[in-house]
Image: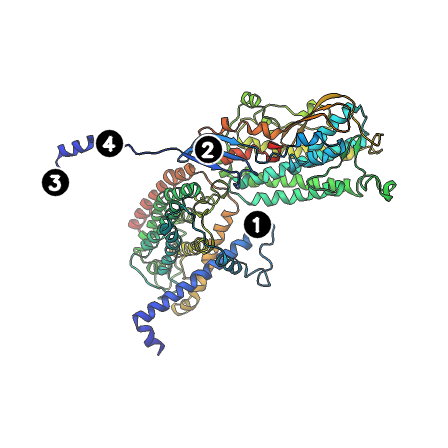
Amino acid sequence: MIADLLSNFWVLLAVKVLIVAALIPVAGLVVGFAELKLSAKMQSRVGPYFAGGRWGWAQLLADGIKFFQKEDIVPENADRPVFKIAPALVLMGAVALWVVIPWGPGLVFRDLDVGIFYALAISSISTIGVLMAGWASANKYSLIGGLRAAGQLIAYELPLVLAVVGVVIMAGTMSLEGIVRAQAGWFGEGGPGLPFVIPQFVGFVIFMIAALAELTRIPFDMPIAESELVMGYLTEYSGFRFLFFFLAEFSNMFALSAIAATAFLGGYWMPGLTESQLTFAGPLILVAKVMVLVFLMIWFRWTFPRLREDQLQTLAWKWLIPIALVNIVATGILKVVI
Amino acid sequence: MSIDHDTLRHLSEVSVAVELETPEMTLNIGPQHPSTHGVLRLVAKVDGERCYDVQPVIGYMHRGYEKLSEVRTYPQITTIINRIDWVSGYANEIPFIVAAERLMELEVPERAQYIRLILTEMARIASHLVFNASYPLELGAATPLFFALRERERVLDLLEGVTGGRFHPNFNRIGGVKPAYGAGSQTRKLAQDLPKGFLAETRQAMDRVLEVCDELEDLVAGNEIILARTKGIGTIPPEVAAAYGVSGPNLRASGVRFDLRKVEDYLPYDRFDWEVPVGENGDCWDRWWVRLQEIRQSAKIIQQAIDSIPSGPLQAKVPKVIKVPKGETYVRAENPKGEMGYYLISEGGLGPYRLKIRSASFSNISILPWLLEGVLVPDIIAIMGSLDFVLGDVDR
């Protein structure tokens, strides 16, 4: 009965969409809560404490409800349609990223042949939303923030893609599922396998740095830069439109970490587990790996100050991109030799 | 359609006739802005990220303290003047009280002088900790703030234990300091001194302050990004600093070894062994570093003062109704923000005829237009923050 229903394309699509729609707020809440608590730990604070009874677990839910209650303010001079679409576009980029993440053998919403390429391309849509938000707000701080975001996108899209090219060369496929299988079967079927972070460590580091920049998190949060631009492109947003940006940030953080975990850390795969075991354990393993990367991002955020706009560009064009190119050449040679 | 070589060359010679209009943008930073330390307003003319003209607009916090002082009695004035620079409220009282005492030719008891000195240095530590903590925040690093403010809280608790106020102690009296329980109290004879255990606790707190200085140095000085953001940014040459009347740590960061605690004798600083730290280049980094060193020196001074504090009365003999004899004087002191001076003119009445307040922050921010010419927008914040001003101290 259920199998019959699921074999219908539209039913399956609806189920998948529902799951993604449910997963995103959950991932956002988990990452957001981790950020609240971890930052508190790092700063000798307690963090959220009262909401929900224990450990303040319901703090972000309460925050979310608060945002819904707030007035949705649109500035008088704003470009109204653009101003209103922008948060949705940002969230769309975040949602679309989830489609290709493999959670276990066969547990993927859509295993595209160009999976990793799609993921990196679709994540840039968010930045267009950010630029729209900055432009439409009719606020000078927002405008500077939006333009900074655009500059950042151009500078960091390249190292992000180039860092992954090494992985693609090694795996011989762009499908994320294929990349996981390539890592699991590196030393033949049933072998110990090899997470690509070991041969591709340089690529991994570049990917994480560029991912931080894509997420506009400290040390690359110039588009927001509270102390300079008040709140950057978010300055004029309030209520649930602001919540959209908020949710997109945390969901993006989770999704990009999942891509990094899949490409470099073996994704849902763990040595010693069989295919059927991975079907059940896969999602947990992936989440565990993602949380390690999320922890890294939170750690950076609360340790580093932000760079200046020109230093950010210097880092991308003079360091990351050349190193990534050298990495690709080295990987290519390695592949041929092996 | 194929394009031959000549057409291509022709195309490359065509110039665009339309002039794109790229007017400058006037960016209003403040009065309500996260990094303007209150209600400073900067009108910046920016071209993209580059700003080529900045004019500070002040006066949003003018409270007229100079005029208010003319209609108050001397004991009442300390109440308002420690609201000038509220981050180090206690230190504001000292030059004014000393000015009044000089005109009255009062001899302040040794113990009272030592207590004043200890509390002034504690106010300096509290003020510098706020700066050293909040400056990385302006560059985007949030965590140092919590480390430093935790220790500042300890210092403020001690200050509160003695004076009854964290920010606005109002503790100095002409001729000495306020007895702990108030002059009219029943317990007057029992408790006319510092709270029990204050000195021992202060010594411990100073040890912690020195530790947190090391922690801050680890966290901030070892951070490549902070160094990249502050080194060589906002350099003030010594001559320019002197020309604009920049004083205090900002001046010393430029390499000028000038500290009023060494030059003037308003408190017995000459009895202790301490140094005046100076910077090398006068950039944002040096200004941060000099203040960190000053915290260490202040902690050193306090520890020595605790060791050698004499016993004795807290108050010189003064008449019940305080009248300052006719005359005028200028007393300046090294406040955490820089040189603070009071020009006091007395006509012999209950209050001053005129009280001119020279506050450090006002002169320190007057250098902003010179300093901010041609810098990037993020550097505006980095430079502004490094001058460590308080708006109450600018507008008075």
Identify which residue is drawn at 68% across, 40% down: B167
Real-space Cα separation, disc 2 to disc 4, in angstroms: 31 Å
Query: Mark 3 belongs to which subunit?
Result: B
Type of amino acid at the residue the image marks with label 1: Met
Q: Which label's residue is closer to the chain start, 3 or 4?
A: 3
- Mark 3 lies on residue: B2
- Mark 1 lies on residue: A42
Identify which residue is drawn at 26% across, 33% down: B18
Whether callout 1 and callout 3 share a subunit is answered no
Disc sitting over residue B17 in the figure: 4
Secondary structure type for disc 4: loop
Query: Mark 1 belongs to which subunit?
Result: A
- Disc 1 crowd, CA 10 A, few/some/many (<14, 14-19, 20+): some
Q: Which of A182 and A174 is in front in this view?
A: A174
Badge 2 vs badge 4, beta-carbon distance below 8 Å: no
Q: For this view, does B4 lie left or right of residue A294?
A: left
Type of amino acid at the residue the image marks with label 4: Ala
Type of amino acid at the residue the image marks with label 3: Ser
Real-space Cα separation, disc 2 to disc 1, in angstroms: 36 Å
Q: Which of marks 3 and 4 is in front?
A: 4
Q: Nearer the viewer, mark 4 or mark 1?
A: 4
Type of amino acid at the residue the image marks with label 2: Ala
Query: Mark 2 belongs to which subunit?
Result: B
Q: For this view, does A178 lie left or right of residue B326?
A: left
- Mark 2 lies on residue: B44
Badge 2 vs badge 3, beta-carbon distance below 8 Å: no
Badge 3 vs badge 4, beta-carbon distance below 8 Å: no
